[in-house]
Amino acid sequence: MNRYLLAGKQSAAIMLLCGLVLIANSVLPMDLNQFGIVPRSLDHLSGIFIAPFLHGSWLHLLSNFLPFMVFGTLIGAQGSKRFWLLFILHIISTGVLVWLFARGNSVHIGMSGVVYAFWGYLIVYGFVRGKMLHLIISLLMLIFYGGLAFGVFPTTLGVSFESHLFGALAGAASGYYFAKPAAQHRAR
């Protein structure tokens, strides 16, 4: 139970940081969101690391809050080291893919790329790992959060479906990578 509590605290701390950045963005005389990811702009490479912490509104932040808390807590239950490794890996991998392949003349911000990466990780990890608890988590992700799959399509103007798509792909790849050695070891 302590693992879940610590994981929840880590996830909450990240979301609190996002809230503080949003408050700062509201009171500062400049728009911090300009520092998000601008595809293929060398001047905005730093956006890969900054964009997840930037949000366009409280509604934008709140839409990422609950899934990030749930997914982050489930991943963090595997250990703090795994949580931070995946958090950083998913920020970088999703950000680089968005920077390379997303539509130009746009600024991509928000934690949703990481949310989708966590979601993809949890689904693939459980099915590849094959242990009952992980399979149940994968199935619950599909049942309760299966609607996230629609977010990878360009359906809503102003929403970075590219972050969602590339996040889900990066998460699925990392889920496979981290589960495969455990599954191979178990099969021997």
Image (cartoon, grey):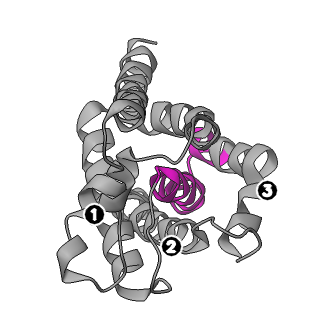
Badge 3 element: helix
Badge 2 element: helix
Q: Residue at left 33%, top 40%?
A: 83
Predominant secondary structure, magenta span? helix
Q: Is residue 173 above or below residue 42?
A: above
Q: Position of residue 76 (x, y in %)?
A: 39, 33
Q: Residue at left 31%, top 40%?
A: 29
Question: Which residue is disc 1 drawn over?
Answer: 47
Question: Which residue is disc 2 drawn over?
Answer: 169
The mark nearer the N terminus, 1 or 2, is 1
Locate the C terminus by quadrant: bottom left
- Front residue (pair 163, 2): 163
The Cα atoms of the two marked residues, 1 and 2, are separated by 20 Å
Q: Magenta segment range?
A: 110-135
Amino acid type of disc 3? Answer: Gly
Q: Residue at left 39%, top 25%?
A: 16
Q: Position of residue 1 (x, y in %)?
A: 46, 12
Q: Residue at left 68%, top 42%?
A: 136
Which of the 4 quarters of the picture holds residue 151? bottom right
Do labels 1 and 2 touch, CB within 8 Å? no
Disc tally is 3
Question: Which residue is disc 3 drawn over?
Answer: 147
Q: Would residue 90 be seen by someone viewing this image from the given angle?
A: no
Which of the 4 quarters of the picture holds residue 173? bottom left
Instruction: Report crowding for label 1: few under 14, some 14 to 19, many 20 or more residues within 10 A (C-alpha).
Output: many
